[in-house]
Image: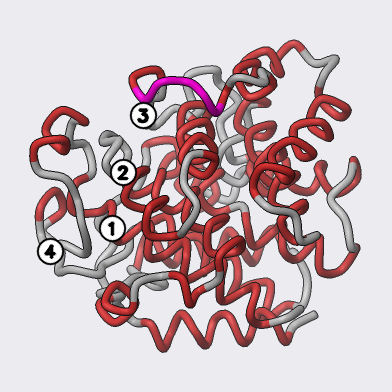
Amino acid sequence: MDVKIVRDMLLGLATGDALGVPVEFESRRLLQSDPVTGMRGYGSWDQPAGTWSDDTSLTIAAMESISRRGKIDWQDIAENFLSWYERGEFTATGERFDVGNTTRAAIVRFSRRLLPPTKCGSTEINSNGNGSLMRILPATLYLYGTRGRIGGDELKIIHDFSALTHGHIISCMACGIYSLIAAQILDGKNIFDAFKLGMSDAQKFYGTDDAFKNFSRLCDETFAALDEDEISAAGYVVSTLEAALWCLLNTDDYKSLALKVVNLGEDTDTAGAVAGGLAGMIYGVDSIPTEWLDTLKRRDYLEKICADFANAF
């Protein structure tokens, strides 16, 4: 795979993540009075500026496994997740400081060796956080790069990739929808066409499933015209997906997108990562402000992860 698209994706994702880390959990109202305008330090997690969180860590944990194994190996990816959780590997500073409850529970289940990796993610309705959506792009890029498409067979693999930590159909479906839109971007479509065509594909694959009703707003032609007050950036996976896509449809460059999504408040790092990964693929790494990239922790390490991943298939 072309290293450029991998680099665009990962640096876009990591930058959006790092922008959101210092203000995670802050309200939109507070951020309206003190908006994020660039890389900040400390704040919510008391981390230096440019520090990325679990969103990027689990993304690169998956990328490292795929690069080394030359394929999607569920056991190996889950082992990498466990290494991150227990030893702080794949982190920006050597410290793991953020983990969602559903992700933690799945990794603990895996550590006990009682279930296969793709059965460790909870299937409970109240376990539909955004913890698999934030790290799904390595699977999307690998499948697109090796098969040239994201179709029904590929979506089954995307669902299993989600189920390493999040096994409910809503989480799996959110990852599938996001991947279908990403595939259109990989085909060279702009965000408006990618969104339209990706959602058309989603309706084709998921339209008869009752769970798809949770994504009904994304099927509405007026979705992009919704007022900001109607968009939530909470940790619920549908909310994160909506927030990321709404911001992408209402901006036209990486910087504007990243600041818009982070200043929505709430789960800022994950919304920033989910939107930032696609924005990087659309606009390219050169669209990311130089001062942001210069502040990003372990950038050389991220660049190496990209090169290894691109050269693996």
Q: Secondary structure at mark 1?
A: helix
Q: Which of the image's four quarters has the C terminus?
A: bottom right
Identified at 63% across, 24% down, the residue is 218
Q: Please identify the quadrant where the N terminus is shown.
A: bottom right
How would you classify the magenta stretch by its main secondary structure?
Answer: helix
Q: CA distance from mark 3 to mark 2?
A: 8 Å
Q: Secondary structure at mark 3?
A: loop
Left or right, 30 with respect to 37, comes to left
**Callout 2 secondary element:** helix
Q: Residues within 10 Å of mark 3 (few under 14, many from 20)?
A: many
* Residue at the image position 60 percent from the left and 70 percent from the top: 63
Please rate how many residues cluster around mark 1, counting C-alpha atoms within 10 Å: few if below 14, some from 14 to 19, many from 20: many
Of residues 221 and 303, which is closer to you in this image?
221
Is 226 in the magenta? yes
Answer with mark 4 or mark 1, whichever residue precedes in sequence: 1
Q: Which residue is mark 1?
A: 19
Please tell me in which quadrant of the rendered image residue 104 appears.
Answer: top left
Q: CA distance from mark 2 to mark 1?
A: 8 Å
Question: Do labels 2 and 1 touch, CB within 8 Å?
Answer: yes
Residue type at mark 1 is Leu
Q: Is residue 203 above or below residue 209?
A: below
Q: Position of residue 9 (x, y in %)?
A: 56, 66
Q: Residue 123: which numbered mark, if any? A: none
User: Where are the magenta residues, as a range?
Assistant: 224-228
Residue at image location 71% in from the left, 18% down from the top: 212
The residue pinned by badge 3 equals 234
Q: Give how far apart the Cα atoms at labels 1 and 3 are.
A: 16 Å
Q: Earlier in the sequence, mark 3 or mark 2?
A: 3
Q: Residues within 10 Å of mark 2 (few under 14, many from 20)?
A: many
Name the residue beneath numbered marker 4: 41
